[in-house]
Image (cartoon, grey):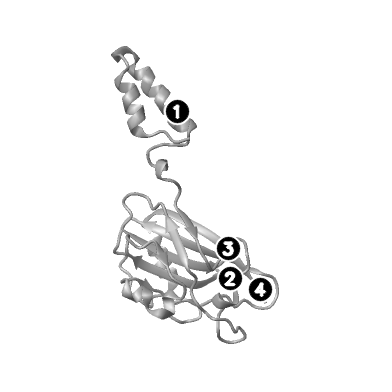
Amino acid sequence: MRISPEVVASVLARLSPARTAAGIASASLVWLAAGMCPVAAQGAFTISSSDLRDGAPVRSEQVYNKDDCKGGNASPQLSWRNAPPGTKSFAVTIFDRDAPGPGWWHWAVAGIPPQIHALPTNASASGALAQMGAIEARNDYGDTGYGGPCPPPGKPHRYVVTVFALNTADLRLGPARHALMFDHEINTSVLAKAQLTVTYER
């Protein structure tokens, strides 16, 4: 059920002054019951991907391509929608939460312009990110850009893919800085974030 602000205003306009306060309270209850406060009316900030499915294993195309891993090492296609008002840029990270120690950074991107709402497959290596003015961090393999999953043999690891809507376009970051630095700066300016989690094991 969707109730527009215009409908509520029209109802309140027909109320007598004595009933206005009660009308406002009633309208507020209607908005809350419908889950339709003005900010929420646009819908939740969400992420989707044609290459990744939430909760599912990573395909070989996105797996790392060095050492004992022989994947395509292509960064995944990502799309997002319903960015909140005031969004001035987007950022993306991929983090292995099951790696030993503090985890493992596979990708961090900042400076994605606010009019961009999707990244193509292999945006990292193809130069698509550079063309739009975005910058990439140095991942925990020591490379700048995307580095796919390549965990030690054993149990599956979980990889958290996050898109951030930010209130600034200037994070004072430069390309090839470590992903942990990107993550710190990104999290100082978050308006909203959307996530999906995928798995991989060897």
Locate residue 195, reporting x and y percent: 51, 58
Using the numbered discs, state the Cα–Cα distance from disc 4 to disc 1 in whole angstroms: 48 Å
Residue lying at the far bottom in this picture: please name it.
Answer: 67
Q: Identify which amino acid the numbered label 1 is placed on.
A: Val
Return the residue nearer the eye: 98 or 201.
Answer: 201
Using the numbered discs, state the Cα–Cα distance from disc 2 to disc 3 in whole angstroms: 26 Å
The residue singled out by tag 4 in the image is 201
Task: Label 1: state its secondary structure.
Answer: helix
Task: Label 2: state its secondary structure.
Answer: loop
Badge nearest the viewer, 2 or 4: 4
Q: Identify which amino acid the numbered label 3 is placed on.
A: Arg
Mark toward the start of the polypeptide (3 vs 4): 3
> Position of 70 compared to 92: left or right?
right
Badge nearest the viewer, 2 or 3: 3
The residue singled out by tag 3 in the image is 53
- As drawn, the label of residue 101 is 2
Badge nearest the viewer, 4 or 1: 1
